[in-house]
Structure formats: C-alpha cells, structure tokens
Amino acid sequence: MKDHQGLRRFADFLTSVETAMQVIKNLNVLNDYIENQKLLTKLPDWVVLRWNREATRKMKAEKKYPDFKTFTTFISAEADLLCNPISSCHAVKELERATDSTHKEPKLKHKEKRSVRNTKTMQESSKEPNNLKAATAMFILQKD
C-alpha cells in the first residue's frame, strides 16, 4: 500500500474491525503487540516509523503497548492527512500536473518556430496612423 487511497481503505477496514470487537470478543487478540506487528507489515515504512514514535510515547506514559483502538485512531488520522483534498502532497502534486499541462506551449516544428524579427517598438507603432483602429475593426469583423 503506497497510495493515499490504499491507506484510507485500510483505515476504514480497521475502524470496522474495531466496531466488530464490541460484539466479537475473539477479536480482542488484536490488542496484542504481536498482532500489531503483523498489521504493520502491510504499511509503508514512513507510516511504521510514525507509529513507532507514537507507540513509544504511549508506552512511556502508560507503561504498556497501545491497544488496537489507539492504532486504529492513529491510522485514521494519518489517512485523513494524506487524503486532505486541499493541502495533502497528493492534492498539491495533482494541481501542479494540471497546471503544467494547461500552461505548456505546444512544441513547434522547426519551420513553425516563432520569430521576433519584424517587430516594432511601441513608439514606431504609435506613429502609424489608424493602426489601433484597424486592428479593432478587424477583431470586430472576425467576431461577427
């Protein structure tokens, strides 16, 4: 699972298992640290590292390994961060790709390359009579 949607699905699955734990008492085995290690193998390294930091903090404070509910809450919070539609890395990169594709100028063949050889300065253009009026008239005619 390397994508934001995969982590979201995993978090949703963990939440449903946590809810089922209230009815199916055998699922309480998931509170064991060995079972937690098995779940961690399904996650990318960066999430495991962040969980390790959180679990270590909890162990120092409570003198026991965090339970399944704590793990589920943590994974859900990470999924929320990763799936934020505005400021997550995924959202920003998606916007960047969309912006790049709309602002890129099409590649021109050698013959079609643009040239600035026959340009005039603003001063030269302003000396030509009716230049602006002619351009405006052409635009209006083309529009109709």
Image (cartoon, rainbow, N blue to C red):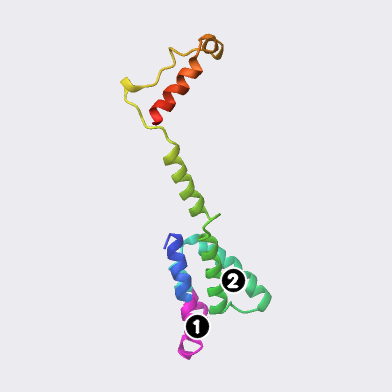
Circle 2 Cα neighbour tier, 10 Å, few/some/many (<14 / 14–19 / ≥20)? some
Examine the image and state in which quarter residue 111 appears: top left
- Mark carried by residue 55: 2
Residue 115: image location, x then y, percent: 41, 17
Is 61 displayed left or right of 115 in the figure?
right
- Give the residue displayed 46% in from the left and 18% down from the top: 134
Marks 1/2: CA distance? 21 Å
Q: Mark 1 against mark 2, which lies toward the viewer? A: 1
Compared with 138, 122 (above or below) is above
Region rendered in magenta: 15-36
Residue 118 vs residue 64, the one in the foreground: 118
Circle 1 Cα neighbour tier, 10 Å, few/some/many (<14 / 14–19 / ≥20)? few
Residue 92 vs residue 31, the one in the foreground: 92
Residue 14: image location, x then y, percent: 47, 75
The majority secondary structure of the magenta stretch comes to: helix
Task: Determine whether the residue tagged by mark 1 lies in a helix, strand or loop.
Answer: helix
Question: Where is the C terminus found, in terms of image quarters?
Answer: top left
Residue 29 lies in the magenta-colored region: yes
Is 53 displayed left or right of 28 in the figure?
right
- Give the residue displayed 53% in from the left and 60% down from the top: 84
Residue 55: image location, x then y, percent: 59, 71
